[in-house]
Amino acid sequence: MINLLLIWSIILWFFKAASLVLLDFFTYVFSFVICLFVTKKEESEVTGFPSMLPGKPREFLVKPLIWFQSTDAPLDEFWYGDYPHKLKNKYDQAYYDSHWWLRYRMRLSWLWRNPAYGFGTRMGFLDRDIVMASVSDNEKDWKSGKNVSSHWIFTNSDGGIGWCYRAQFYYYKTHCLEMYLGYKILGDTIKNRKLVAMQLTPFRSYP
């Protein structure tokens, strides 16, 4: 029975991934407009995670559009978070606070980095009493230069079945094909869900 449920889960994930690809494209194309509609709120009240800057309102997309941004971080995270950007080296906090164009540019950078992230959360696997049904965990060899693949199959109390597949296949020295598919069982639970994973990187390189 679990095999049939797993097959259905894979098919369902495929349609979710295809939808997210379209939503990613839509976000890239219309990000210049989407980033105009912003409100400020306490970070922890929106994300459910501790605020990086308690008491300082952070930027978020307005409610009808919030699914286009990451659900675990504000829209201005590129400026306040530990993310390299040439503009952060050129301008200081005072300039950022007093120049709208720079704040707008940082919103775009974050949205481009995590397009349609909220939809990926909403389509994720419900993290409710997850139980592992099958595990092949070779994570100790991740980024080691060796070919490695791992899988997880899991269920929740609602009777749903989810899966995760991660692999690195090296084809030339430090260069590899990297895959992360299914649901991010290894990642954080956001909004009570494990996010949809749809990473396929053919030119990843590790020293």
Image (spheres, rainbow, N blue to C red):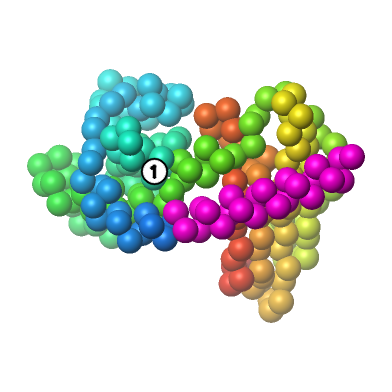
Picture coordinates of residue 23, whole percent (x, y)? 44, 54
Looking at the rendered structure, the number of numbered marks drawn on it comes to 1
Q: Is residue 6 magenta?
A: yes
Picture coordinates of residue 122, whole percent (x, y)? 52, 37
Q: Amino acid at mark 1?
A: Gln
Q: Residues within 10 Å of mark 1 (few under 14, many from 20)?
A: many
- Can see residue 80? no
As displayed, is residue 191 above or below residue 3? above
Q: Residue furthest right?
A: 1
Q: Toward which corner of the image does residue 201 lie, by quadrant?
A: bottom right
Residue under label 1:
69
Picture coordinates of residue 112, whole percent (x, y)? 37, 55
- Left or right, 104 with reference to 95: right
- Left or right, 164 with reference to 111: right
Magenta span: 1-23
| Magenta span main SS | helix
